[in-house]
Amino acid sequence: MKKILLAIIFIFTISGNGFAASEGSEDLSKNNNKPVNDCFEGLNRGIFAFNKALDDAIVEPLAKGYRKLPSPIRTGTSNVLDNLGNLITIPNNILQGQLGSAGINSLRLLINTTIGIVGIFDPATSFGLEKNGKEDYGQTLASWGVGPGCYIVLPILGPSTARDAVASIASFSGGDPWYNITVRNDTHYVADFDYYASRVTKGVDFRSKNIEAFDNLEKNSMDFYASVKSLYLQDRRQKILNSKRIIDTLDDSDWEEIETN
Amino acid sequence: MFFKVKFKISLTLFFLLSLIVNSHSIEPNEFVQKTVNRASEALSNKISTEIKIKKLKIIAKETVDIRGIGFYTLGKYRKTLTDNQKDQYISLFEEYFLKTFSDRLAEYTDPKVRVDSYEKLNENYTIVSSVLIATDKRPEVKIDWRIYTKNPENPLIRDLIIEGLSLARTQKEEFNSIIQSNDGDINALFSSLKKFNSK
């Protein structure tokens, strides 16, 4: 039922933005530089306020506590979660035709899970296999030409777009091997708890790395919701384009009119 | 003979003058490194936060195109402003910018920035790439600087792009959100700026 409801929201919200042109990277970059509609702004602001309260009460204190752990433990935890992330990145590398990256990430996963002891250490990088950017099903849909649809804020999970929220269903429908062996299938080695613990730890790990940045942004924003939305969408656009190039330089038109000296 | 000598003197003077003029122009990467060094020195001194903020504000006024950024952040609403509103806005924006800029930076102590390379986009803009070197408390951060080079003798910073996220763009989208939430009324932004500046 939940999936059907999400699919209906997806169709409704995507139809507002239309599908993107799918011919060539230039079209992709143009499509991804378009403003994303905030179709449910009132509701989004409400959920944002709820998430903020949850963050103040639970997540931020947890993140501050997590930060007190010795640095090697935090680095090891971060490495394990990063290694697990390859399980979603590799199928998406293949779906996007990035076969070279799929090969490198598979080798990284193999080496770090075995020699690196379930990913605590990162010997793959010392073997010359550098980290690649993460990929997910939302990025794959975008690379196939699907527009972002409306901007949405999900309870607990935070900012997203209609496309990315619906794409995440793929992870729970067989597209995430880690979810498959922990929650979907009953294995003797790992259980549901391991999956949910990894998701919560990932959130806390991310938050602990950004305590000052979040505080600073909140302190210096007149509309914190709008600032977070802008930063999220810029970051997402950059990940979809897999571009090292500065996104704002893709569209200089607004700067060109301004002359002050 | 007299004319020949006069011509030679003129030529020499012209040459010397052009040398002097050229010596005043500065490459964008050098400009960024000098600016960063100035800010870093101000932050590393064992002085009170208030004095640090004062010093940072002076540096910002000299090196950042606050007026240009101010107009950029208005986006499509820029064209709807009267001259009076423009003056009012720039005055409010400058106060807002200096307050947030110095507040953000004052929390850093002795930041080390390494300027790596630069790319000239066109006559008006160069992007300078740099890295805020990692410490025990935070990882390495990639910072790109959009430098306005229309006047090569006086380059100015127009944007900081941190790990690919543009501060000017974020500011523009925040301001536009405030105006849109108030049915396109620019005065709502002025009120928000006044309220923020008085905090």
Image: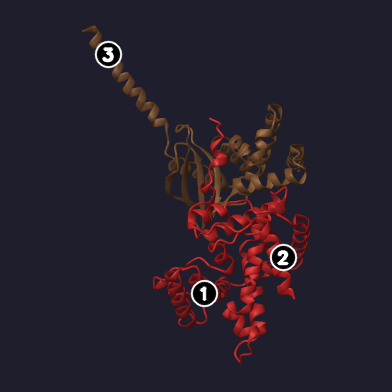
Q: Chain of mark 1?
A: A
Tell me the mark number nearer the camera, choosing from 2 and 1: 2
Which residue ends up furthest to the bottom in the rendered image?
A: A188
The picture quadrant where one finds residue B28 is top left
Secondary structure beneath label 2: helix
The chain that appears red in the image is A
How far apart are the two marked residues, 2 and 1, measured between alpha carbons?
26 Å
Q: Is residue B48 visible?
A: no
Q: Amino acid at mark 3?
A: Phe
Q: Is residue B133 above or below residue A185?
A: above
* Disc sitting over residue A9 in the figure: 2
Subunit of label 3? B
Q: Amino acid at mark 1?
A: Pro
Numbered disc 3: secondary structure: helix
| Disc 2 crowd, CA 10 A, few/some/many (<14, 14-19, 20+) | some
Residue B7 disc label = 3
Q: Nearer the viewer, residue B28 or B70?
A: B70
Question: What residue did someone put label 1 on?
Answer: A91
Q: Residue at x 63, y 38 (%)?
A: B70
Relative horizontal placement of residue A175, taking residue A55 as reference (left or right):
left
Residue A136, by quadrant, is: bottom right
Picture layout, residue A112 above or below residue B24: below
